[in-house]
Amino acid sequence: MGLPDTSTLADDLYALRVEAGALVGAVAVIGLRDWNWGSSPEFRIRHEGWFGSDTESGGMDKLGHAYSAYLLTNGLTERLVEQGRTAESAARSAALLTQGLLLGVELFDGYSTRYGFSTEDLSMNLLGSAWAVLRQSTPKLRERIDFRLAYQPSGYHGWSPLGDYAGHSYLMALKLSGFEATRRSPLRYLELHLGYRARGFSPEELSDGRTRSRQGFAGVGINLSELLWGPATAADSRLRRNGRLLLEHLQWPGGAWYPP
């Protein structure tokens, strides 16, 4: 799982030029509009902490960084695979492009009075892409484990899900369809979930009287991808591939039960 050679990386970056341009443009707009880029005349380094009760979001922003890097790496990998690359080779190039983009975000954050350059964010970015590359390079791992976001608007952050950590939950889903012992039984439609959420950290929640809480949770989910399409095959249509990709990253509402 080493780095791609220079010619391979250049070819892959050229193949992703449209996606890369769109991502850079979108990030620039959001950064200038919402993240106060350019508001600090000096480069600032900010130590934000990790998952403590005294942090800004109880660690939800850190999981958000890992998830964003993971999502971008997987999405760009899929685009390269559609153009004939192997999943392992595509994932390495996609991870490098993702890390370049997110490093740029952190550097511009350094010139924001609201944020600042964060080594914690940088570490979680790397972790997210590394997990994506490992998963893409190990078919059995992809068959068995998903890293997902479950989102329900909190009402504290307007219409945008970006930064609405009061509505975010992050989870790992263990898919029983990926195991030989259960892939031919009705258990293949089930998943085991383990996740984390934090509530009451935003100023809006605190002003509404909510107390800070950090919660781990576990439960059982329905494998909607297996239910709709069955096992993945090389003959899958683009619609099915994209549908699977979506469900590997987003937990559909009402698709799991978590004991109180």
Image (cartoon, grey):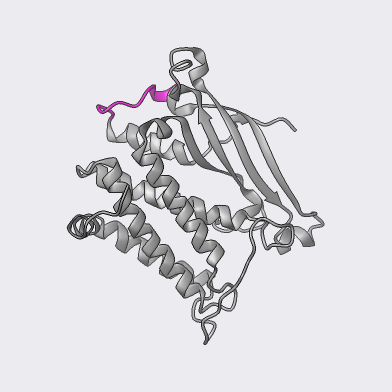
Asked if the stretch drawn in magenta spans residue 228, the answer is: yes
Indicate whether 119 appears above or below 77.
below
Classify residue 121 as left or right of residue 258. Answer: left
Question: In the image, what residue occupies the spot 42% across and 52% down?
Answer: 129
Question: In the image, what residue occupies the spot 51% across and 60% down?
Answer: 123
Q: Which residues are magenta?
A: 227-236
**Quadrant in the rendering for residue 100:** bottom left
Asked if the stretch drawn in magenta spans residue 162, the answer is: no
**Quadrant in the rendering for residue 222:** top right
Indicate whether 207 appears above or below 139.
below
Between 69 and 169, the one lying in front of the other is: 69
**Quadrant in the rendering for residue 39:** bottom right
Between 69 and 20, the one lying in front of the other is: 69
- Examine the rendering and report whether any part of residue 32 can be seen: no
Q: The C terminus lies in which quarter of the figure?
A: top right
Q: Position of residue 92 (x, y in %)?
A: 31, 51
Q: Position of residue 164 (x, y in %)?
A: 61, 55
Classify residue 122 as left or right of residue 205. Answer: left
Q: Extreme bottom residue here?
A: 41
Q: Position of residue 109 (x, y in %)?
A: 51, 73
